[in-house]
Image (spheres, rainbow, N blue to C red):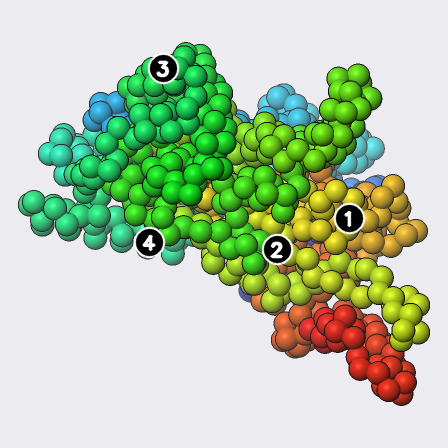
Amino acid sequence: MAIKTAKQGTIISRYGQTANCIYIITNGSVRSTYYTEELLLEKGDILGLLDLNYDFISSTSIAETDVTLFEYPCVNYIDLLNLLKTNTEIAGLLATSLTKHVCQILDNFILLQYSTDNFYHFLINSYDEYKRLCTQYHVSAKALPGMEALEKLILEDDIEPWLSDYYESVRDLNPETQRKLFFDNPNFLIGYILRAGLDVHKIMEIVQLLQDYQGDISYLLLNENHLDFFDLYSSLYFRAIKENKDTMFIASTISKMMIQIEAQPNIEKSLYKNRANEYKTKLLSLESDGTRENDLLNTTPVQNSNLTDSLTMILEYSACLDETAASFRKHIHAYKQILDKTSDEENLRTLRKTLTTLFYEIYTSAFQVSLSDKNIPTILKMFFLFGYVDEDLAGFENASYLYSISEQYSSDYKHGVFSIYDWLRLIYSGEKEPSRNEFDIDYTQYVRESKLNGKLTDETEKRMLSDQAQKVMFELKNMFPLVNKITYGRISSFCPIFSEHNLLKSPDSILVSPDLVKKALKTIRSLDYSAFYRETIYTNPHLDIKKEMIQVEILPDIILMPNIGTRGVMWQEIEGRKRTTPARMMLSIMCLDDVLQLVIRLTGEYRWELCKRIQGSRWNDVTDPSLTSEYFDYIQFYRKNNELSQEAKEKIKLSLQKAKNNFKEMFVRDYISWITYESNSSPRLNKQSRKILFSYCAFSKSTRKQLKTNPLYKEMSDRYDLKIAQKLHHINNVYQKIRNSGNSIPPELIKQNEFLDR
């Protein structure tokens, strides 16, 4: 035993440190934090018991006041048993202190479970209430991204329901019974302490899951993109004010929601303050403006005679079958009458499915007609680009905006950013090959398998392999409908028709232009400079270059799908089997999410899939080092990794649970953190993950130079710079050899030198 004193604010023990002693507080108080659970320990309480028989300390303890403690070396239960034999008087302190702490932790845990369940139901009820109010005000309910995926947290390994009652019963035992249990039976006391440690460690794991879950779903309440309940309700409130409707109930609901937002620890206070100020400013503006004609939420339709009866023009242009046109018109009329188009009622699901089938039939027919039309009407361009079919469904203001931009909107062929319509025309002209289908089969393989299955003759097979019209049909039937649904993001309520209920923001603010995509790619490439480079072999017999490995940048083709969506899709990493062909990525042409963040995610997915493609069957074989093999090995054996702290291991375990044990998803999340945070010297990754990413997704020279000031990156950066210097030395030797022969340097090698110098 040793007497230890600590001034107020002193850290007595830190999370992750080796657990090798216990402390009895003899004077003052200590605050212990388990994850985010705080316990106040006072005179007579004991620190360290819950970590007995564990390799690490599970809490951080700080002196709340000046404190005096008795320190007892104690690595495991054998040490504690020996301590009890020589200090029988502390048995009571051990049992009493431990039971009190476990009961406090259990009480907090039960409250957290209750608040998590309440928060989930609050979000569900808020959406139902919002849709009810929309019906009351005769307004089409907006579709909130994320609500479709909202699920109640089901704990796979919850604590036993009797546990709380058990520890409370122990706490309430009379002194005589406690003495019989603990004082007179040290082996029983040791077992009780060990069991309590197991229970608390399990509780803390679940606490982290509950807190992460609350954090994950809190964005539905309030987020930076304004795609949240606060915006849904405030927009409806402002509209009701403008139309002089009774707003008392909705105003009260917003006030309650603001209280809920303030109570959420996962929502930044500065974000809430800014949004609350926006809300109050707009409300004051409405109240002071009697006519309210200048408000941004003005719902007066913008008249545009060119939009009148758009559906008839589209149907006539498409030259589809009369019964198809009649059915589509009938179902569009029914769809327009529904206020809650996000409902999962059976009749609405059937209606959306029917409309979807008819939409693609008409789209295909109209596309075929347009191939021989040099002057495609603007309404049809709106249909091809955005899925627009009806001015009432779109809302006149939105339809007018689409009309104003459809003539000017163009793909960027040079930089590989295409609208779906232009992409289909490129396939028809033979400049691009169709994408793989959902079974990862490309057009050539599909035709040949059809031949092998006896569905095609030799002659038909040969004709289909060069039939551009058939290739377009393959794209229209396979990639187009599936990716259109995925990029939309809310699969169960998907309908490809442009509808105002999907617009949570003004269309001009979410339109994805080729320039916006190029800007996102430029940002990523300025950090992860090698993201889209492929290694290939360069030979030049004239210069006596038999084999030189060089890097060639192949930027992806990005196709903009005709919907209002929230997701991106990394569809394929190469075209066919040739490794120097562009990847294919898809985004919504009207994107409610942040385009840069989506493209960062797609780039992470692309890096993983391309590495798997190159490595083949050895993609997870660590004896053949690669991005996927090293990352796979790191995740698979993280528990045995001595370079990782216990805290890091706990975070990996929780991250794996959130990623549903998907290693690729784990990597993509790390890659997003790598580009978004670590590039700015804001650490988010553990040592091992950072090391892998620095090896295979290294930052550009300028970024590495900035990061060198941070000790976390300096050693890795120096090692990487040394490797690059060796490659530059090699290429300079090749340069010198070519110059000595009197020849000029080939452009391929000049570009390789530029690549290495980035």
Q: What's the residue at 11%, 34% (across, down)?
A: 244
Crowding near pointer 4: few (<14 within 10 Å), some, many (20+)?
few
Q: Label 2: which residue?
A: 673
Q: Label 3: which residue?
A: 326
Q: Label 4: which residue?
A: 273
- For this rendering, which residue is in front, 130 or 699? 699
Q: Is residue 609 above or below residue 483?
A: below
Q: Could you tell me which secondary element the residue under label 3 belongs to?
A: helix
Alpha carbon separation for disc pair 4 and 2 = 26 Å
- For this rendering, which residue is in front, 119 or 458? 458
Q: How many marks?
A: 4
Location of residue 564 in the rendering, given as x and y in whole percent from the top left corner: 43, 38
Q: Label 1: which residue?
A: 578
Q: Is residue 181 above or below residue 535?
A: above
Q: What's the residue at 27%, 42% (across, down)?
A: 400
Three-letter amino acid code at disc 4?
Answer: Lys
